[in-house]
Image: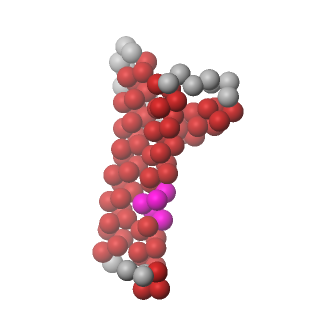
Amino acid sequence: MSPRHRNGSTQAATAIAVLADVLAAIIALWILMYLLEANRANDLVQFVQGAARWLAGWSHDLFTFDAAWLRVVTGYGLAAIVYVFAGHLLAGRLRRY
């Protein structure tokens, strides 16, 4: 569909899907940095960690595995999956209207 034929709900749906993907990517980037033991004194690492912690505030300590890496992957990974799933579900509903 060409851009001139898009209606407002399609544009909003695209924006929501992209936003959900970006939020999930930030969380995934933190998981990757954690697993690769990125330097936590680095400003970029601190920013990504803070953003991911804020985005996954409801799930980052949800699981209590003994291994710290497993807690990070499951807690933050769950948040990333929920963002993608909910964002794309909402975007799909908007596209139907």
Magenta stretch: includes residue 31? no
Looking at the image, residue 79 lies above or below residue 67: below
Where is residue 49 drawn, in percent x and y?
A: 57, 33
**Chain part drawn in magenta:** 15-19
Q: Position of residue 77 (x, y in %)?
A: 39, 36
Give the total number of marks visible in the rendering. 0
Q: Is residue 53 above or below residue 89?
A: above
62 vs 70, nearest the viewer: 70
Residue toward you, 76 or 33: 33
Residue 52 screen position, x and y as percent: 53, 38
Residue at image position (36%, 71%) is 94
Relative placement, left or right, of 81 versus 54 is left
Q: What residue do we see at 43% from left, 34% from top?
A: 76
Residue 55 seen in the figure: no
Task: Using the image, determine if residue 85 lies above or below residue 71.
Answer: below
User: Could you tell me which residue is drawn at 40 percent across and 24 percent down?
Assistant: 71
Secondary structure mostly seen in the magenta stretch: helix
Instruction: Locate the N terminus and report the quarter of the image it occupies.
Output: bottom left
Where is residue 41? Give x, y as percent: 68, 24
The answer to whether one can see residue 76 in this image is: yes
- Taking depth in this image into account, of 54 and 36 the one nearest to the observer is 36
State left or right for residue 64 relative to residue 18.
left
Most extreme residue toward the top is 66
Quadrant housing residue 43: top right
Q: Which residue occupies 48% across, 65% down?
A: 15
Quarter of the figure with residue 96: bottom left
Residue 82 to residue 76: above or below: below
* Quadrant showing the C terminus: bottom left
